[in-house]
Image (cartoon, grey):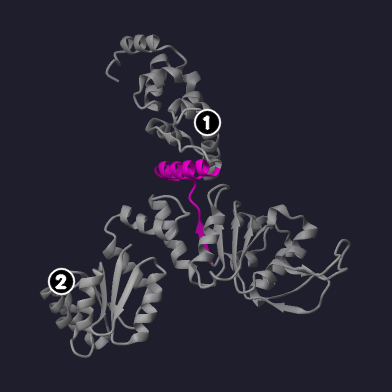
């Protein structure tokens, strides 16, 4: 975990910055005096110092010189008022890293910190992995996704998460809630696709006893239960147009009535919606209200499909192996690199959910402690080789099998359903003995 030392004579600024940066998963300490800050830096050993440039006792230049004299050549961001910019520029010339003008733009500060502390994609991804451990991946697509979550989490604006089934939309919704100011309040998920037309209004807004047949007692709706927290409307495209109109009112006015009751109930809820449909296209076809679409789509988040981030497959597979072996209380299995390569050749129409199910089957149905390329090949619905089999020559089949098996001739023979002797005869026949 990266360490940051904040130096400012104003205690409230130290408190605010400490809270903001601690929430970003940094280890933060502070000092209200430059001389004490130097002593604290020696013990705390920060990766970065954020300091006001005008403080009693020492100004920013003098403070920076004192740090250097004590062999503390650290990355440093100065906070400066407009009138102190020349001093900040001088500090940059001496070797300080950055300066920010007051009032501080906290999003800009976070960006500058990331740029200073994480000099490559792998380091940035590692930082995000610590902060969002349930979102697995280090690809650029995942870094971009987490940066969007990071920016959106602190606000109450509605979020529309769009993506194919199995990409992890609910995980992102949970991350938005549990990294927001509402994290200590309830997170309530509603599966709109699982509720019939007659049930969904009661489920969302509640009902009074006797409001309809079967309403044998009063019931709170999900919006009332989630008051102060967040509500996830999963697969919102499945809600009928008449319910969409009532949902629009909740978003606009922050109020609703239970079924069978005239009393208006106020509700302070952040709405997060997900869909695997193209809502913009549904609006064009009059299947989804345009006004509701724009109310939901304040902050759009698009989930990358697994086929667009195949470099994350190894991390995902390792995560699923740990999770499934622990759940089933069995000895942890391993997987060969050749097997990973076969997994990467599949297009994953079911995305991460499909991958998890495949790994679970491989763990349960294979006695071997190591999952082989052949086991994966046999488990996948259709491999590249099978898809093109009818159009391949014997030589092309051989080359394709060797690619899948990563040069392992035993595995290649199994894929081709031939003996090792036949495989070696083919290799000799086509001049591929060194393959």
Asked if the magenta segment contains residue 136, the reply would be: no
Q: Where, by quadrant of the figure, is residue 215 drawn?
A: bottom right
Say if 190 sits above or below 406 in the image.
below
Main secondary-structure element of the magenta-colored stretch: helix
Within 10 Å of the Cα at label 2, are there few (<14), some (14-19), or many (20+) other Cα atoms? some
Residue in the foreground of this view, choosing between 96 and 368: 368
Instruction: Determine the residue positioned at 37% across, 23% down.
Output: 402
Asked if the magenta segment contains residue 317, the reply would be: yes
Q: Quadrant of the C terminus?
A: top left
Within 10 Å of the Cα at label 1, are there few (<14), some (14-19), or many (20+) other Cα atoms? some
Instruction: Determine the residue positioned at 78% across, 59% down.
Output: 199
Residue 62 point in image, percent of width and height: 14, 83
Query: Does residue 296 appear in the picture of this structure?
Result: yes
Query: Does residue 349 appear in the picture of this structure?
Result: no
Q: Quadrant of the N terminus?
A: bottom left
Q: Earlier in the sequence, mark 2 or mark 1?
A: 2
Q: Is residue 5 left or right of residue 419?
A: left
Magenta-drawn segment: 299-327
Under tag 1, what secondary structure?
loop
Residue in the foreground of this view, choosing between 229 and 326: 326
Which residue is tagged 1? 380
Which residue is tagged 2? 95
Under tag 2, what secondary structure?
loop
Residue 375 point in image, percent of width and height: 48, 27
Residue 315 point in image, percent of width and height: 41, 45
Q: Are marks 2 and 1 in contact (CB under 8 Å)?
A: no
Say if 303 sits above or below 336 in the image.
below
């Amino acid at each position: 975990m990266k360490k940051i030392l904040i130096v400012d004579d104003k205690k409230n600024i130290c408190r605010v910055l400490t809270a903001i940066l601690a929430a970003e998963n940094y280890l933060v300490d502070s000092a209200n005096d430059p001389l004490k800050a130097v002593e604290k830096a020696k013990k705390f050993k920060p990766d970065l110092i954020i300091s006001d440039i005008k403080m009693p006792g020492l100004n920013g230049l003098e403070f920076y010189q004192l740090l250097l004299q004590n062999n503390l050549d650290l990355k440093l961001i100065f906070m400066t008022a407009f009138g102190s910019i020349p001093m900040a520029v001088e500090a940059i010339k001496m070797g300080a890293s950055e300066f920010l003008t007051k009032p501080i733009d906290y999003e800009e500060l976070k960006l500058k910190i990331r740029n200073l502390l994480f000099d490559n994609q792998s380091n940035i991804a590692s930082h995000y992995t610590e902060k969002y451990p349930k979102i697995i991946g280090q690809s650029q697509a995942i870094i971009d996704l987490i940066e969007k979550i990071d920016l959106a989490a602190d606000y109450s604006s509605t979020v529309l998460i769009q993506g194919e089934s199995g990409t992890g939309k609910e995980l992102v919704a949970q991350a938005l809630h549990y990294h927001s100011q509402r994290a200590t309040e309830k997170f309530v998920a509603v599966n709109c696709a699982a509720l019939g037309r007659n049930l969904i209004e009661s489920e969302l807004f509640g009902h009074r006893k006797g409001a309809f047949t079967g309403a044998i007692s009063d019931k709170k709706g999900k919006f009332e239960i989630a008051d102060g927290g967040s509500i996830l409307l999963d697969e919102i495209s499945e809600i009928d147009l008449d319910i969409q109109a009532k949902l629009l009112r909740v978003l606009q006015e922050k109020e609703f009535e239970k079924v069978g009751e005239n009393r208006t109930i106020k509700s302070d809820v952040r709405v997060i919606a997900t869909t695997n449909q193209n809502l913009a296209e549904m609006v064009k076809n009059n299947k989804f209200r345009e006004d509701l679409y724009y109310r939901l789509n304040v902050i759009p988040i698009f989930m990358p499909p697994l086929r667009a981030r195949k470099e994350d497959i190894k991390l995902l597979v390792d995560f699923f192996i740990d999770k499934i072996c622990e759940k089933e209380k069995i000895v942890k299995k391993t997987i060969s690199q050749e097997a990973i390569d076969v997994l990467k050749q599949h297009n994953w129409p079911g995305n991460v959910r499909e991958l998890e199910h495949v790994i679970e089957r491989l763990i349960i149905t294979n006695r071997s402690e190591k999952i082989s390329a052949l086991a994966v090949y046999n488990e996948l619905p259709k491999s590249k080789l099978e898809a093109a089999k009818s159009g391949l020559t014997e030589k092309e089949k051989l080359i394709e099998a060797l690619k899948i098996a990563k040069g392992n001739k035993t595995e290649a023979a199994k894929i081709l359903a031939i003996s090792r002797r036949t495989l070696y005869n083919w290799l000799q026949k086509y001049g591929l003995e060194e393959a």
